[in-house]
Image: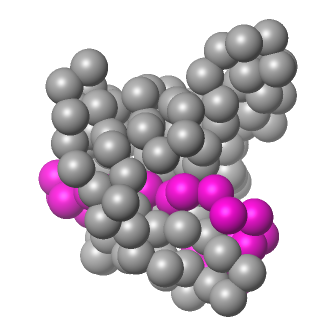
Amino acid sequence: MIEVFRSALDAMRDAAQAAHPREACGILLGEGGRITEARETRNIHPSPHTHFEIDPQALIDAHRAARSGGPQVLGYFHSHPVGLPEPSATDRACASGDGRIWAIIADQDVRFWMDGEQGFAALSFVPIES
């Protein structure tokens, strides 16, 4: 089970709503099993209505900040403007099996997944105050 700051959940939902009908995306930051921030990034994919690609510079910046003592990059989030908050066939094909957390938002529903070597596994979470 992971812990997620309510402010991070709100940020993901707000990003998904603002991007609709395109996919929103961003980076999940925190420590250990606690997500403290969901940082929205530009979706640079050429087909943003059906795919997402996090701006590489945002990822580089987040990893640099983590090496300097900032929050760690725990994973990523994106929205499904149409569909369910679970990994799509495209998500499964693009996943790297790196053990990162993926949050997927559909409507206002946010679900979390572990991108493991054997594929995605659902994660339970508990919202907490920041």
- Whether residue 23 can be seen here: no
Is residue 55 positioned above or below 39 on the image?
A: below
Disc count in the image? 0
Q: What's the residue at 43%, 37% (across, down)?
A: 35
Tell me where the magenta segment starts and ends, as one range.
91-111
Quick one: 47 or 83, which is closer to the camera?
Answer: 83
Q: In which quarter of the image is the N terminus?
A: bottom left
Would you say 60 lies left or right of 48 here? right
Q: Where is residue 123 in the image (x, y as percent from the top left)?
A: 38, 68
Q: In which quarter of the image is the C terminus?
A: top left
Would you say 20 lies left or right of 128 here? right
Q: What's the residue at 33%, 44% (across, down)?
A: 3
Q: In which quarter of the image is residue 90?
A: bottom right
Residue 100 part of the magenta segment: yes
Q: Position of residue 80 (x, y in %)?
A: 37, 64
Q: What's the residue at 49%, 79% (across, down)?
A: 121
Q: Where is residue 18 in the image (x, y as percent from the top left)?
A: 30, 35
Would you say 124 lies left or right of 65 here? left
Q: Position of residue 118 (x, y in %)?
A: 67, 88
Residue 93 part of the magenta segment: yes
Q: What's the residue at 43%, 27% (across, down)?
A: 37
